[in-house]
Image (spheres, rainbow, N blue to C red):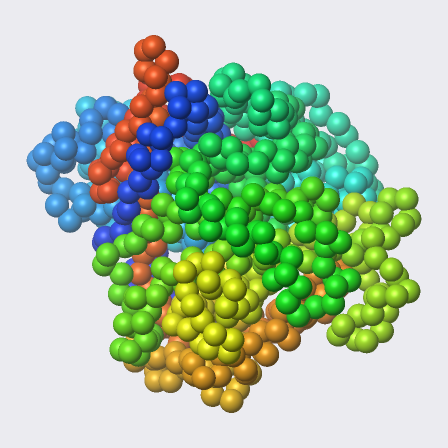
Amino acid sequence: SPSTSASIPFLDPTLAMSAAEEEVFKTPLSTPICLLDSTEAFGGLSDAERLYAHHMSVGSWGAALVCLIQCSPESPPLFALLHSLFTSEGPARLQPKVEAAGVSPDDWAAFLQFTACFLGNMGNYLSFGDTKFVPRCPKDAFTAILGASVDAAQLLERWGAIADSVYDLDAGCRQMGLESDGISTYYSAGIPKKDIELVQDFLTESNMGDQAYNTRLFRAGGALRLCIASAEAKPSVEHTFRGQKIEVAYGDHAPFMQVLADSIERAKASVPAERGDQRDMCERYVAAFRGGNIEDHKASQRSWVKDKAPPVETNIGFIESYRDPFGVRGEFEGFVAVVNREQSRKFQVLVDNAMAFIAMLPWPEAFEKDSFLRPDFTSLDVVSFASSGIPAGINIPNYDDIRQNDGFKNVSLGNVLSAQAPSEKITFLSDADIVLFKEWRGKSFEVQVAIHELLGHGSGKLLREEADGTFNFDREGVKHPITGGKVETWYKPGETWDGKFGAMSSSYEECRAECVGLYLCSEPQILKMFGHDAKDGEVHDVIYGNWLIMVRAGLLGLEFYTPSSDTWRQAHMQARYVILRVLLEAGQGLVSVEGKGADAVVSLDRSKIATVGRDAIGAFLCKLNVYKATADVAAGSAMYSALSSVPAEMLELRQAVLAAKQPRKLFVQPVTTLQEGGKVTLTDYPATPEGLISSFVDRFSDDGPLKGLVEAVAKCGQFPYAS
């Protein structure tokens, strides 16, 4: 709580930061970098499939420049500056000139590390945790490096406009947040939550709750301006809602949406006529990104769900709302990947038996979907993931009505899961658990991700009232599992899950899916599908490994809690911390945290997982699902907030977690190139800062398909787009 944190200087934003405290925000000395290897998978595609993948990749990366705009005011011009620097001279050519200018090798290495981290996160805030990072080299060294360039004059002029912002660590910009809690470029600076809530109410009552996904919101004089991402700058539409003028404006991110729509049109030409759903998906995408109507994007997702087993899988749009402090606006992402058919067969067996496994979940049938809409569940080797970060698995679309009525898809990103940082140190476990953790981490995580995505995100029903006054549940016959009485709350017409639960919704849902993974990972039938034999009641190493990963992750989650504002900065890590709290409160020696500081160890009693542990998770999971299903914001928020609280003993452990934290790995992604004659090639780069930098220089080359976009992003500010 704020009162507790005020006694700890690092946690109090009103106090000046010491050098030691600033260290937390400096780019690490060495960030692990992994190659996202898709060479073999890409090589197995036909020429037409490669061409489709190329155009989809080009469009996705062109539109991914929006992530810079969604990150911070200084990120777009800083990207353009760094791109210009390394386009003129690569790192190897620039290094001797920099050293001749008096820059130390350590400062040059720190500059490269910062550049790699900036590009890998598509901005100067960590994609996982939403905290700012600044160069480890001093500002004068950064300036000297730019001054050594052949283009020094123009680079230094551009640097002068943003240098202070890049290094700024004032309390208001250390993390993303609303009002005094941080910054968010989804909104005007200092915009009050009541304005955001008002506009969301306007959208909900206009039956457009999902339209928020591709928007930003600004105050323009006395009006609130809701800016919709679209290539076309259509005339604005003015509304008055509860006495407030709201202007709906189009053309936000226009240059990037234009390139995206054009690229998808080119990609569609490579789709065979017999893949009608895929062709329709492309057409709907083009309409969505040209015109900005979220209903067109929802139509693209319906076609995407119906497009079964394509050789090249892709999904594009403003998808995840993790980085919006209010929880309703999506960050742009676009991925292009090749299906690993052999690995996907394993997941399809899980899909074939999904109804039986969902029936094992700890809530009554009335709180489950009327029918399980069989999804595609595929293992993918990613060719391009154009956004600020790359997940291990995905369950989309996020639109409630599509998930309920049309279905969804699950994807496991195989070449992301297999990429391990060799230098990672395993902390806060006993020596014996470290040995088991290293051996079983990959296998346990594979099982958890599969259950989490398919049976976690894929389960549960939202009880709602339809526009015609009918209900999708029996109001008289359905009993509330927690209260024993009738269901008193449900979703009204136009209301959505994330619109109702707001900023909490992302973490709450991730927690629900993680709990499903823990609850079902002990089922012998599921384990057998992944090559593990276990008897009923037996806690196989793969089960113990999964629970051990979760309780340790809950402790590590403290890194992503900000005591001064009592806020969490990362949805998944908050969810894992909440699960740790549930298991600690279960008592009976199931989970314990012993020792202090760097000597702290989290322990898990294997013999109690199947009894105490599973009972505790089952009871909690039932509440999570029922409160979500019934739109019971009051009960759900009270429960989740209480478990998200960080008492004094956990605040003390947080200091040890911060001291031991390790940088999250970055990925070097390949670049596709369309050669003369229509052939597409794939270029890999070394897994080094220099390799990552080179990949971005080539991806946005001045003579490539995305030429001109870097300068376009450099001119971006708040809406409207400044040409």
Considering every residue shown, the one lying at the far bottom of the view is 588
Q: Where is residue 587 in the image (x, y as percent from the top left)?
A: 53, 86
Seen in the picture, residue 242 relative to 457 is either above or below; the reply is above
Q: In this view, does 83 lie above or below 572?
A: above
Q: In which quarter of the image is residue 123?
A: top left
Image coordinates for residue 451, horizontal then vertical, percent: 53, 58
Q: Which residue is drawn at 81% across and 44% down?
A: 205
Residue 349 x %, y %: 52, 52
Question: Looking at the image, which residue sits at the far top?
Answer: 677
Residue 415 visible, this orientation = yes
Along the horizontal axis of the image, is 518 left or right of 139? right
Q: Can residue 227 be seen in this view?
A: no
Residue occupying the point 54% across, 25% down: 257
Which quadrant of the figure contains the N terminus?
bottom right
Image spot of residue 337 (x, y percent) = 43, 36
Q: Tell me which residue sits at (43%, 81%) in the image.
A: 606
User: Which residue is rendered at x = 45% and y = 71% of the image?
Assistant: 534
Left/right placement of residue 297 relative to residue 317 reads right
